[in-house]
Amino acid sequence: MLGEFEIIARYFAPLAEGTPGALGLGDDAAVLSPPAGEDLVFTTDTIVSGVHFLSDDPPDQVARKLLRVNLSDLAAMGARPLGYLLSFTLPATVDEAWIEGFAQGLASDQDTYAVGLLGGDTTSTPGPTTLSLTAVGRVPAGRALRRGGAKLGDIVFVSGTIGDSALGLEILQGRRTVEMESDRERLVDRYRLPRPRMALGRELLERGLASAAIDVSDGLAADLGHICASSGVGAEIDAVDVPLSAAVQRLVESDAGCLVTALTGGDDYELMFTVPERLAGEVGKLAVELDLPLTRIGVLAGAGGVIVRGADGEAMELGPGGWTHF
Amino acid sequence: MLGEFEIIARYFAPLAEGTPGALGLGDDAAVLSPPAGEDLVFTTDTIVSGVHFLSDDPPDQVARKLLRVNLSDLAAMGARPLGYLLSFTLPATVDEAWIEGFAQGLASDQDTYAVGLLGGDTTSTPGPTTLSLTAVGRVPAGRALRRGGAKLGDIVFVSGTIGDSALGLEILQGRRTVEMESDRERLVDRYRLPRPRMALGRELLERGLASAAIDVSDGLAADLGHICASSGVGAEIDAVDVPLSAAVQRLVESDAGCLVTALTGGDDYELMFTVPERLAGEVGKLAVELDLPLTRIGVLAGAGGVIVRGADGEAMELGPGGWTHF
């Protein structure tokens, strides 16, 4: 087993090279300032082996997922990423190849998202590998996208497709099978590697389109509930309008229960946002510019709560799926 | 067992009330700006049950220690604290009373240090309770205290007393006994409850006294080694000059090995700093103003490495104690 300082020197210090404010990881803390007229934005997420990822998941994908779920929170605020701090808590049984793969995954995504390591902590545990990441981004001062600005009559949009990740996890767990290998690959890939919608969040902010935004992590229905609770409104969406990939459509055709999983499963890391009706036409243009589907799925209506209408026009019974960690 | 959202609503949301930028924990991320002319400073630390604290430690003290070790890193940079993010990773066996005690400890120290909860994450684990905290502070732009500014001839000072915490841990582990109950209480208290030297760090920065600073967490000898490595100098200190509490002095008198534990054991969370010789006289005035012992323990000399001279004038053999987590 490598020592703490060797792990830092060999694998983490290179990730901090060139990160403004990281001070080469050689100090007690990182130092950072936002550009004039900007606020800094912070978010933190922890993942645990056996809970949020599987112990035989490729370590580079674990690293990239951890970074990306945090970047997704920044995207939901319309923020540009600056850097991140990492707490790396390892059992003695983790071998160096795992650490090396993990660091390689971070290096790869640092290039993709133009972020760098700012600082961190490396400790040991008698339990499972536990990884906490705090991401730091920046937004124009006072203009961060929030959950609480939605108004009755605003239109609800969501990016990309919903449900791939939740069904990919069920496949990995052996709880569901698909006929086509390409469907398996797509769904598992979406579970392992979120695509945080950084450009979408930024453009929604800069164009002043979104009255509220959130990233879909707890599940589409639950996260829409968070917007409704923060904004003091209700929402009505049509399940048939929720965008599904071809792979998920095929699963839903063979088992209607898959639709409930898609609507409540979470881990999508798409952005859901509300747009005043008079601006809704602008969303189509943005979708074309970003080459990213942005789909109208419903409207804010009623006093509270989320109603999801099925194909028969009746409210669906979604159950508690996808809501909490406990 | 409480659900994730209930834990947040009942115990953590109250800790974020009134924290600027926390947005009531109701958004994807916190938003914060430093005052004009200031930089933000970030640090993160993780503690694991059974490794960094004991499972029967009082939960309020665990919380306060976690917050304080992070504040100590801010103090070492000369920063004023602003707030913190918390990742709370819990086994199903943790009961609500533990969570409540933990939150009470945070509330108490939020008042003491004028900080608030900015955001966080609550997840479950099959392993031990694991707690990651990221603290955010502020310093005048470009003036954060660093480890790398020390010069040959600078005088080495340390605040408070050294070794109480490491010997307190040995007492808690049943590896050491003391005759006086009041000694036991002092040493155990110092292990459980660090006193981050916020005012000292701030004054060292504002008065321009320190050429380098660090908080003593890995052990006095190791942390002086960090300053030496960052600054490209060596250091010579005299063990007899290292400030010891009366309780530690009594232990050293009965077992000279306790002196090695004190010098290498870590978890002191005092500040060690270097001062150009022409300014060393100012340190005594600062000690009086802060009502905090600031003791001269040695000088920067030589090309690299730390030499600790014993009472006989010979270099002590300190061994690898206190250096790493692995």
Image: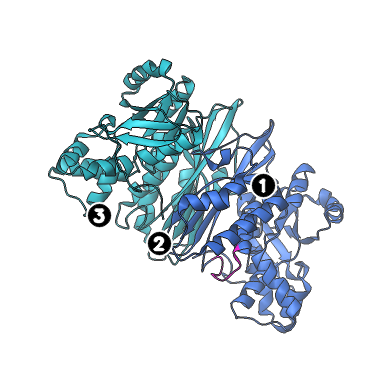
Chain colours: A blue, B cyan
> Which residue bears the numbered disc 3?
B173
Whether residue A161 appears in magenta in the rendering, the answer is no
Say which amino acid is labelled 2: Pro
The image quarter in which residue A161 lies: bottom right
> Which residue bears the numbered disc 2?
B128
User: Is disc 3 in contact with disc 1, using a CB cutoff of under 8 Å?
Assistant: no
Say which amino acid is labelled 1: Val
Q: Residue at x 37, y 20 (%)?
A: B283
Q: Residues within 10 Å of mark 3 (few under 14, many from 20)?
A: few
The answer for which chain carries disc 3 is B
Majority SS type along the magenta span = loop
Q: Is residue B310 above or below residue A180?
A: above
> Relative to residue B11, is residue A57 drawn left or right?
right
The answer for which chain carries disc 1 is A
* Closer mark to the observer between disc 3 and disc 2: 3
Residue B70 lies, in percent from the top left, at 44, 42
